[in-house]
Each structure stands twice: as C-alpha cells, then as structure tokens.
C-alpha cells in the first residue's frame, strides 16, 4: 500500500462518526488505550521518511485497536439485542393472548346474537 493510500485509509477511519449516549461516550474496556496520532515533520527528506515510519506504525496500531473496538461493540450489541428479543417475545406473547381472548369473545357474541336472531326471527 502506498503512503498516500495509507493516509487515505487513516483519514477514512477518522471520518467514522462517534456516537454519544446519555450515559456518556462508550468505550471498549478490553482494548487498552486508543493510539495517539503521531506528530509529523515533513520539513526535510530525512524527517519526512521518519514521519512515514511513524504514520505506518500508528496505522498498524490504530487498525489493531479499531478491530478490537469493533469486536467488543459487536459482542455487546449482540448481547443487548438478544436481551431485547427475550423481552419483546414476552410482550408479544401477552399481546397475542389478549388478541385471542378478544377474538374468541367476538366469536361468542356473534354466535349468541345469531342464535337469538334465528330464535326470534323477524319479531324484533
């Protein structure tokens, strides 16, 4: 990967949105500290070459850190999603039970009224 392409990849990572939550900004506890971006000095060829090395080292560390954060986020999101599915299932069961009872009540009412209508015919 050429240096300009690497820089683009680094900037692409930086462009990812950071989500905030009422409890504060989430972070992945098991991933250590986020690598600090190095300061670059491109005032001479020697310093430029040293800066490329710093940028490459940072890129590797940042990608490793980002992969860890991504794994941890997916793990936590999956756990939350699974918990929500259980809670939603409980709600759905209760809602379905109410709908079945009301449907059965409507059927019973319609049956009783139909029988009464047949019994009384046109008298009403």
Image (tube, rainbow, N blue to C red):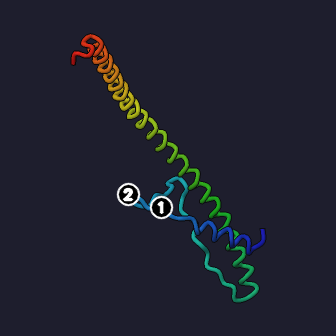
Q: Which of the 4 image quarters holds residue 40? A: bottom right
Nearer to me, 116 or 13: 116
Q: Which mark is residue 23?
A: 2
The reply to whether the C-beta atoms of the residues labelled 1 and 2 are less than 8 Å apart is: no
Q: Which of the 4 image quarters holds residue 34? A: bottom right
Q: Which mark is residue 19?
A: 1
What residue is rendered at 30% in x and 12% in y?
A: 118
How far apart marks 1 and 2 lie (CA) works out to: 11 Å
The answer to whether residue 116 is left or right of residue 56 is left
The answer to whether residue 83 is left or right of residue 113 is right
Nearer to me, 22 or 27: 22
Q: Residue furthest right?
A: 2
Label 2 secondary element: loop
Label 1 secondary element: loop
Q: Quadrant of the C terminus?
A: top left
* 1 vs 2, front mark: 1
Residue 9 in the image: state x and y as whole percent.
68, 68
Q: Residue furthest front?
A: 122
Q: Which mark is residue 99?
A: none
Residue 89 in the image: state x and y as whole percent.
43, 33
Looking at the image, residue 83 lies above or below residue 116: below
What residue is rendered at 78% in x and 71% in y?
A: 2
Q: Classify mark 1: residues with Cα within 10 Å, few (<14), some (14-19) or many (20+).
A: few
Q: Which of the 4 image quarters holds residue 37? A: bottom right
What residue is rendered at 63% in x and 68% in y?
A: 12
Looking at the image, residue 26 lies above or below residue 110: below
Q: Residue furthest left?
A: 124
What residue is rendered at 49% in x and 54% in y?
A: 29
Q: Quadrant of the N terminus?
A: bottom right
Residue 74 in the image: state x and y as whole percent.
55, 49
């Amino acid at each position: 990967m050429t240096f300009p392409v690497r820089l683009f990849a680094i900037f692409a990572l930086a462009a990812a949105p950071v989500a905030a939550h009422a409890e504060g900004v989430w972070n992945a506890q098991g991933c250590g500290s986020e690598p600090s971006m190095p300061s670059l000095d491109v005032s001479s060829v020697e310093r430029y070459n040293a800066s490329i090395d710093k940028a490459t080292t940072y890129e590797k560390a940042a990608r490793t850190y980002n992969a860890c954060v991504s794994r941890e986020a997916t793990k936590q999101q999956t756990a939350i999603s699974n918990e929500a599915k259980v809670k939603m299932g409980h709600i759905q069961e209760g809602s379905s039970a109410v709908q079945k009872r009301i449907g059965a009540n409507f059927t019973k009412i319609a049956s009783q009224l139909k029988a009464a209508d047949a019994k009384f015919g046109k008298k009403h």
